Image: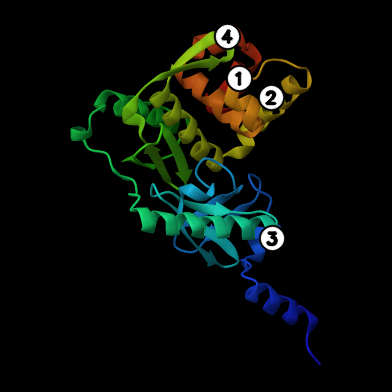
């Protein structure tokens, strides 16, 4: 007699499904995945800045997890429902083929000859400041990717900063605060690594941001408003490092909660 479960698995394989049960069951941004030889990673959703299909070079199945390799050198684990995971995998493969067809270059390491040294230094200094506050150590890699804007990603013990040499500033932060984009990227992404090493200490900040949101109080930034309170925690950390006095005036409760986490 044919095993119904085995038959379903065969049908999924023939249909091109991703056979990664741990990634299917996982809750992104809450669960962690241990990858042999790589370390422990927070499971990421399928549509973040560093996990949406165009940003992925390749992926593999490791112990039931979907482990990805980004075009900028980042690595991590993604999770989601089977149907969405299959769609994500199909799109990753399509973009990979497009890069082969049109010769799209991968990210390359930044060098002083590429310019923007002051911007790169600002991003690195902000990240290192965050690491010191959090009591963690991590490798920082700086990349250039054609046509992209300043961005970053944190995976395991590696912080990848991409196109931060381009510079710029943004003023969509609480209280009209303006921040250097390279420094904000460095601080925000470094905060992800600090959070991964001690999420419990940031619980009070997370609860406060949820409470403020429920009361209709201002988000800390446009990104916080769009991406939710998990990213809001990282935005609070970046403001605490880069503009502490302005944060203290605009949102003293957030300042105190962030100080409890990082201070």
Q: List x then y, in percent, for residue 21.
A: 66, 65
Say which label, 2 or 1, has the lower sequence index.
Answer: 2
Circles 2 and 1 in contact, beta carbons < 8 Å: yes
Mark before the other along the chain sequence, 1 or 3: 3
Q: Which residue is mark 4?
A: 175
From the viewer's perspective, is the residue at label 4 or at label 2 nearer?
A: 4
Secondary structure under the numbered disc 1 in the rendered image: loop
- In three-dimensional space, the C-alpha distance between marks 3 and 4, rounded to whole angstroms, equals 42 Å
Asked if the residue under mark 4 is in contact with the one under mark 1, i.e. CB atoms within 8 Å, the reply is no
Q: Nearer the viewer, residue 178 or 149?
A: 149
Of residues 35 and 25, the one nearer the viewer is 25
Secondary element type, mark 4: helix
| Mark linked to residue 220 | 1
Between the residue at mark 1 and the residue at mark 4, the CA separation in whole angstroms equals 9 Å
For residue 217, side relative to residue 37 (left or right): right
Q: Around disc 2, counting alpha carbons within 10 Å, would you say few (fewer than 14), some (14 to 19), or many (20 or more)?
A: many
Q: Position of residue 166 (x, y in %)?
A: 33, 27
User: From the viewer's perspective, is residue 177 above or below residue 133?
Assistant: above
């Amino acid at each position: 007699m044919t095993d119904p479960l085995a038959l379903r698995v065969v049908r999924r394989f023939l249909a091109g499904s991703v056979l990664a049960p741990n990634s299917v069951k996982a809750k992104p941004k809450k669960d962690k995945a241990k990858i042999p030889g790589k370390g422990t990673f927070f499971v990421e959703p399928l549509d973040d800045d560093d996990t949406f299909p165009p940003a992925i070079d390749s992926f593999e199945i490791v112990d039931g997890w979907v482990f990805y390799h980004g075009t900028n050198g980042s690595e991590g684990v993604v999770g989601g429902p089977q149907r969405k995971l299959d769609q994500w995998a199909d799109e990753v493969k399509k973009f990979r083929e497009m890069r082969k067809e049109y010769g799209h270059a991968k990210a390359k390491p930044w060098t002083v000859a590429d310019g923007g040294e002051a911007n790169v230094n600002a991003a690195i200094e902000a990240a290192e400041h965050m690491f010191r506050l959090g009591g963690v150590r991590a490798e920082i890699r700086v990349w250039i990717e054609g046509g992209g804007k300043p961005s970053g990603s944190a995976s395991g013990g590696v912080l990848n900063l991409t196109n931060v040499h381009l510079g710029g500033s943004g003023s969509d932060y609480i209280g009209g605060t303006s921040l250097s984009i390279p420094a904000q990227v460095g601080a925000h992404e470094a905060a992800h690594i600090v959070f991964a090493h001690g999420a419990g200490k940031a619980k009070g900040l997370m609860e406060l941001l949820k409470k403020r949101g429920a009361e209709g109080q201002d988000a800390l930034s446009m990104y916080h408003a769009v991406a939710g309170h998990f990213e809001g925690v990282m935005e609070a950390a970046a403001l605490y490092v880069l503009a502490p006095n302005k944060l203290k005036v605009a949102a003293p409760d957030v300042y105190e909660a962030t100080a409890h986490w990082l201070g």
